[in-house]
Amino acid sequence: MSNNLAIKLRTGTQKSHTAAENVGFMKCFLKGVVDKSCFAKFLGNLYYVYRELEIEIEKHRHHPIVGGIYFPELNRQAALEKDMEFYYGKDWRTCVQPSPVAQSYIARIRELSATAPELLIGHVYTRYMGDLSGGQMLQKIAQSVLKLEGYQGTSFYNFDQIPDKKAFKDKYRQALDTLKIDDATAEKIVAEANNSFAFNMKMAQELEGNLIQAIGQVLFNSLTRGHNTGSTEVAAAN
Ligand code: HEM
């Protein structure tokens, strides 16, 4: 018997998804306006979030509910480490720190792991299903705009253990649907998925200042490119 969690999550987070797509950072990204240092910061926050999420999910892999959505082939920590090394070099750990929002996001994951681990499902759903969906679009944009080779610097989006993403998403939805949960728990998981969207939106918003500065620099460079002949030189030549 299905608990309909997959459809409850999809419909219950639809408004959040629309809001996430409409955050300035994401809108710019979709239009191909993405700056290397902002993108690296974006991935840096995700590194800390995924590290925490994956530690906690692993801890609860035998939990009667959480165990039902344990798919280690989704794990992103190692891929994000590769990306961090690409952008910041071998000593990346000395210069990459989680932002204030990332820190509260991590604290929430830790709190749930200790008090209501089944609600972590709202978090893994939001991140992994998103990475397997819109995330794949974002990878193509980042690769082309930042002129990156293959998955260099975008390993995060490379699910090499999941060659057929659509089939995997169907399997994941089926796993969600067969979790042994009651309606009240399903409702709490959906609420937590919305909470996860909110953290992700706030993390993107934190980066907007950096992005605006980068856009300003690009515009300035473009407006000041080339060397104009001075007006008095022009006048003298006439
Ligand atoms: C510019 C940004 C984004 C675009 C263009 C985008 C696009 C999409 C698309 C096309 C789908 C449907 C894929 C399918 O049905 O197989 C999808 C699904 C999804 N996205 Fe996004 N997305 C974006 C941002 C985000 C963000 C920021 C999150 C959360 C952190 C997110 C989470 C999800 C989730 C959880 C699903 C699965 C919905 C479901 O079927 O249950 N997306 N996205």
Image: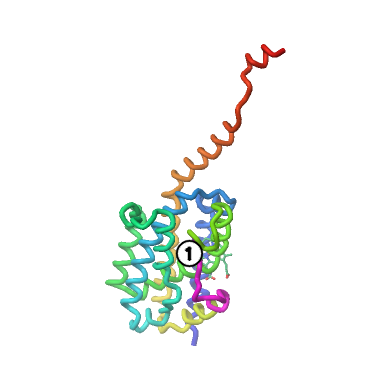
Horizontal arrangement in the rendering, residue 25 relative to residue 236 (left or right): left
The spot of residue 221 in percent (x, y) is 55, 36
Q: Is residue 228 above or below residue 5?
A: above
Residue 160: image location, x then y, percent: 50, 73
Mark 1 Cα-neighbour bin, 10 Å: few <14, some 14–19, many ≥20: many
Which quadrant is home to the C terminus?
Answer: top right
User: In front: 168, or 92?
Assistant: 92
In the rendered image, the residue lying farthest to the right is 238
Disc 1 beta carbon < 8 A from ligand 1? Answer: no
Q: Nearer the viewer, residue 11 or 158?
A: 158
User: Outermost residue toward the left?
Assistant: 114
215 or 108, nearer to the observer: 215
Q: Position of residue 109 (x, y in %)?
A: 33, 66
Q: Is residue 160 magenta?
A: yes
Q: Is residue 83 left or right of residue 103?
A: right
Residue 226 horizontal/vertical position (percent): 60, 31
Write the residue at 61% across / 19% down.
230
Residue 180 is at least partly visible in this image: yes
Eyeballing the image, is 20 above or below 79? above
Query: What is the number of callouts on the image?
Result: 1
Q: Which residues are magenta?
A: 154-168
Q: Residue at x 58, y 51 (%)?
A: 32
Any part of residue 202 in sight = no
* Vertical relation: 140 (above or below) 25: below
- Residue at image position (40%, 73%) is 121
Q: Can residue 141 be found in the magenta stretch?
A: no
Secondary structure, mark 1, is helix
The residue at the point 42 percent across, 68 percent down is: 76
User: How did the renderer colour the structure?
Assistant: rainbow
Give the residue pinned by disc 1: 155
The answer to whether residue 77 is above or below residue 29 is below
Q: Amino acid at mark 1?
A: Ser
